[in-house]
């Protein structure tokens, strides 16, 4: 998948840097949206894009926004991210998107009129057809919609609401996935995603509080304003290379003194216990963290890229009075989650 930033595609030659070349996109079918989570509804839209592109001998493309519009307008109250940009890129490539266009959502972009945005699509991005949700709106005055684009001369296919098959016949949406994850209902969230929910990030330096209590943790960089799930979880974790591929025995191979950890539930993974949230017991109310403890592992994980898959929800974050009470709480959580792991099929 080729990834371009919109500024690169529409910049005049005089505005390009020495390291940037102008790009002319091939004629394409485009879809537009946040695509947060790349759930089954999103996947249906991507399939429609691919089908039309194949039938008309066009390329397939998607435009997403960074930051997502609600993060631009009201970052403090914006919905939690299901996927950061890197995770979204990896998923879209997996689902067969040929070209990803990342539009920087800023004051200039939001000020575009519906006419200017249509011109951008047709004249600068070489869009010949679009696949859009039936509620898609655009332009600073919100006057742009599918009919506006048809009147402009573009071929537009509207994909109607995708519902799940759980018996509730409810719309599949990023909001529903967030609500399920926040409630700890991982299985139901996974059913809407069509895969297991995971977070990918680099291990970065932390405050080493866990180490002082004999529960060292890997602090995984979230790369989002706040995560979509909070609490204490059983996880399994793999290490990824620069291409996003799983490294065989990537974690256990780093073991020191023979302490190679507990095997996870998928190949090349290790079992871990994770806390994701703001850690109320250590007075870090606005410092969102994903911290993973690997029982029976002694290894230096700094700088590794880890993919953390959430398996089982134990409970929400708790406030403990003092570090000694916190240590006891962590001990009990780790014990309970290891017992859960021992009950799972190998």
Image (cartoon, helix red, strand yellow):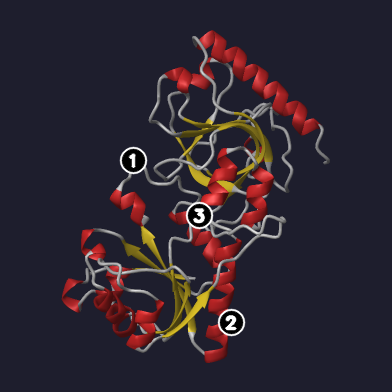
Nearest-to-viewer mark from 2 and 3:
2
Q: Horizontal and vertical percent for residue 68?
A: 37, 55
Residue 267 got which mark? none
Q: Are marks 2 and 3 in contact (CB under 8 Å)?
A: no
Q: Which residue is mark 1?
A: 76
Q: Which residue is mark 2?
A: 51
Tell me the SS state at disc 2.
helix
Q: Horizontal and vertical percent for residue 57?
A: 52, 90
Horizontally, residue 155 falls left or right of residue 308, namely left
Q: Earlier in the sequence, mark 2 or mark 3?
A: 2
Tell me the SS state at disc 3.
helix
Q: Earlier in the sequence, mark 1 or mark 3?
A: 1
Q: Badge 2: how crowded within 10 Å, few (<14), some, or many (20+)? A: some
Q: Is residue 322 above or below residue 303?
A: above
Residues 128 and 3: in front is 128
Nearest-to-viewer mark from 1 and 3:
1
Tell me how far mark 2 sits from mark 3, CA to CA: 24 Å
Q: Earlier in the sequence, mark 2 or mark 1?
A: 2
Q: Badge 1: how crowded within 10 Å, few (<14), some, or many (20+)? A: few
Horizontally, residue 199 falls left or right of residue 120, namely right
Residue 175 seen? yes
Q: What residue lies at 28% left-to-right and 81% top-to-bottom?
A: 119
Nearest-to-viewer mark from 2 and 1:
1
Tell me how far mark 2 sits from mark 1, CA to CA: 39 Å
Q: Which residue is mark 3?
A: 87
Of all residues, the one furthest to the front in this rendering is 168
Horizontally, residue 244 falls left or right of residue 102, namely right
Residue 249 seen? no
Q: Badge 3: how crowded within 10 Å, few (<14), some, or many (20+)? A: many
């Amino acid at each position: 998948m080729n990834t371009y930033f919109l500024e690169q595609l529409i910049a005049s030659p005089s505005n390009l840097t020495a390291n940037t070349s102008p790009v002319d996109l091939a004629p394409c079918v485009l879809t537009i949206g946040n695509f947060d989570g790349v759930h089954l509804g999103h996947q249906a839209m991507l399939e429609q894009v691919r089908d039309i592109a194949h039938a008309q001998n066009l390329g397939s493309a998607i435009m997403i926004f960074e930051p997502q519009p609600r993060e631009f307008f009201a970052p403090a109250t914006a919905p939690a991210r299901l996927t950061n940009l890197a995770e979204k890129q990896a998923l879209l490539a997996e689902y067969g998107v040929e070209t990803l266009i990342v539009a920087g959502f800023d004051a200039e972009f939001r000020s575009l009129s519906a006419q200017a945005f249509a011109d951008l699509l047709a004249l600068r991005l070489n869009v010949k057809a679009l696949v859009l949700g039936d509620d898609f709106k655009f332009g600073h005055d919100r006057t742009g919609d599918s009919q506006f684009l048809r009147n402009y001369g573009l071929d537009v296919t509207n994909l109607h609401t995708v519902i799940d098959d759980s018996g509730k016949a409810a719309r599949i949406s990023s909001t529903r996935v967030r609500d399920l994850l926040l409630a700890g209902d991982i299985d139901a969230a996974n059913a809407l995603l069509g895969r297991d929910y995971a977070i990918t990030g680099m291990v970065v330096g932390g405050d080493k509080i866990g180490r002082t209590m004999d529960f060292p943790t890997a602090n995984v960089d979230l790369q989002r304003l706040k995560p979509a799930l909070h609490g204490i979880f059983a996880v399994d974790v793999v290490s990824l290379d620069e291409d996003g591929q799983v490294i065989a025995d990537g974690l256990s191979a780093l073991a020191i003194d023979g302490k190679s950890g507990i095997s996870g539930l998928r190949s090349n993974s290790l079992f871990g216990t994770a806390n994701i949230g703001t850690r109320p017991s250590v007075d870090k109310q606005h410092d969102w963290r994903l911290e993973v403890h690997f029982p029976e592992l002694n290894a230096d994980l700094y700088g590794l890229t880890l993919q953390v898959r959430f398996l089982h929800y134990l409970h929400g974050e708790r406030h403990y009075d003092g570090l000694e009470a916190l240590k006891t709480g962590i001990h009990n959580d780790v014990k309970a989650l290891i017992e859960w792991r021992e009950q799972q099929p190998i």
